[in-house]
Image (cartoon, rainbow, N blue to C red):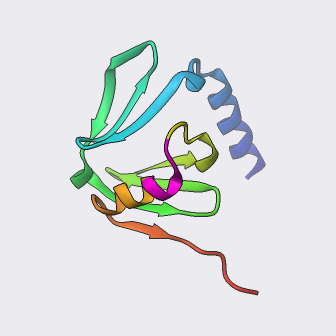
Amino acid sequence: FNRSATKLLQTLSERQGLAQMRLVFDEDGMHAFQLDAPDEGKTIPYPSLEWVLETDDLLLVTYDEAVMVLQKRDLLTGSIFKLREFLGERTAYVVCSPPET
C-alpha cells in the first residue's frame, strides 16, 4: 500500500497545472478544462454519468468506468445544496450519511 501511495503522489506531483483545472456543470453536462485552454476540455453529457455519490467532504462522479473525486470545499460558486438539486434532476444522486453511533 505504501509503495502504491508513494507512486501515486509522485505521479500527481509531476503533473503541471492541476490547480488551473476547472469543472463546470451546466445544462449540457459536466465540462472539464484547463483555464488557459477552455476550448480543449472534455464534455461528459449527463446520460453518460452513472451516478454521483456525496459524502461529508467529497463528490464521487462515475462515468465511463472512471471515478472523478471532487472535494466539496473546492466549490467556487453556488452552494452544495443547489448543486445537489441540479445534479439530482439530471442523474442518479446519492447522499451517503455516516452511520449513527
Q: Is residue 25 left or right of residue 2?
A: left
Q: Position of residue 51 (x, y in %)?
A: 37, 61
Image-based side of 70 in relation to 12, left or right: left
Residue 44 vs 11, above or below: the answer is below
Q: Which image quadrant for residue 29?
A: top left
Position of 47 with respect to 77 (left or right) is left
Residue depicted at 39% across the width and 60% down the height = 85
Residue 21 visible here: yes
Residue 9 x, y percent position in the rendering? 70, 35
Residue at 25% x, 44% y: name it: 27
* Quarter of the image where one finds residue 30: top left
Judged left or right of residue 66, residue 27 is left
Relative image position of residue 53 (x, y in whole percent): 48, 63
Q: Nearer the viewer, residue 75 or 101?
A: 75
Residue numbers of the magenta segment: 78-82
Q: Quadrant of residue 62?
A: bottom left
Q: Is residue 46 magenta?
A: no
Q: Position of residue 70 (x, y in %)?
A: 54, 46
